[in-house]
Amino acid sequence: MRASPRPYRPLTPEGKHPRYKKMDLLRSFAIVVLTGSMLSGCFSGKDWRTASRESAGIAPDPSLTREAVLQVYGADAWGWRGWFAIHTWIAAKRTGESEYTVYDVVGWREYRGLPVMRIARDVPDRYWFGEKPRILREHRGPGVDDLIDAVDEAARAYPWKTIYKVFPGPNSNTFTAWIALRVPELELNLPLSAIGSGYASP
């Protein structure tokens, strides 16, 4: 008996089978990442130790703002990763509070033997090591205190408090996505550049 012929797969306009086209794309992506890493190391004058962590002046001044505020921030990741990825975090203050609470995950804490997840009173809108943050979602006013309570509860239930992996996760975006999934009232849709957010999906 003759073997059944392989199913026909049309060629792409470049004369390649689709699977080889995908392999070319993966190779190109790898080259971009490696090149970015090398260029960053060779030509970047930035030093994370001296990069700005000051306030970007985005969040409402808590001493002048009585209403509850909840903000989700994103900023380009440090170094060459910032070409295609962001770092995200959440900042909130309840009605009448004079300080913000920041909810975030920071990978370097793992090297110091600390939990990577952090809940602390802090400046809400710090530059992420020289990169200016932007607001991804904001809630203010009536009803936001309850939303903050829900976010706080979800954050404390985060299952990877001591584990961090840049890819595929869990990382800072996994943490933010975890909260968004458990608090749908947050109405947060993270961008594709929030690499690691998919790790939180069931």
Image (spheres, rainbow, N blue to C red):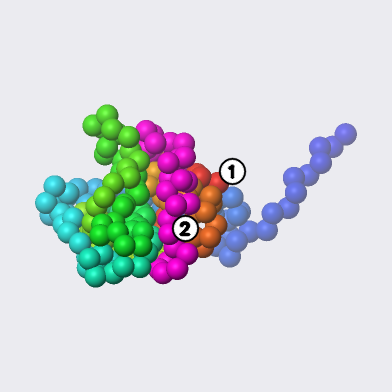
Can you identify the residue that label 2 sits on? 147
Check the image and report above or below for 90 versus 172: below
**CB contact under 8 Å: marks 2 and 1:** no
Mark 1 neighbour density, 10 Å: few (under 14) some (14–19) many (20 or more): few
Q: Is residue 7 magenta?
A: no
**What is the crowding at mark 2: few (fewer than 14 residues within 10 Å), some, or many (at least 20)?**
many
Q: Is residue 80 visible?
A: no
Q: Amino acid at mark 2?
A: Leu
Residue at the far right in the pictured view: 1
- Tell me which numbered mark, 2 or 1, is placed earlier along the sequence: 2
Q: Is residue 115 visible?
A: yes
Horizontal side of residue 74 vs 99, given as left or right: right
Does dot 2 land on a helix, a strand or a loop? helix
Q: Which residue is mark 1?
A: 202
Q: Which residues are magenta?
A: 139-168
Kindly identify the amino acid type of the residue bearing the numbered disc 1: Pro
Per the rendering, the mark at residue 28 is: none
Vertical relation: 160 (above or below) 27: above
Please provide percent x and percent y for residue 33: 34, 50
- Residue 54, image quadrant: bottom left
Q: The N terminus appears in which quarter of the rendering?
A: top right
What residue lies at 26% left-to-right and 57% top-to-bottom? 99
Q: Position of residue 97 (x, y in %)?
A: 30, 59
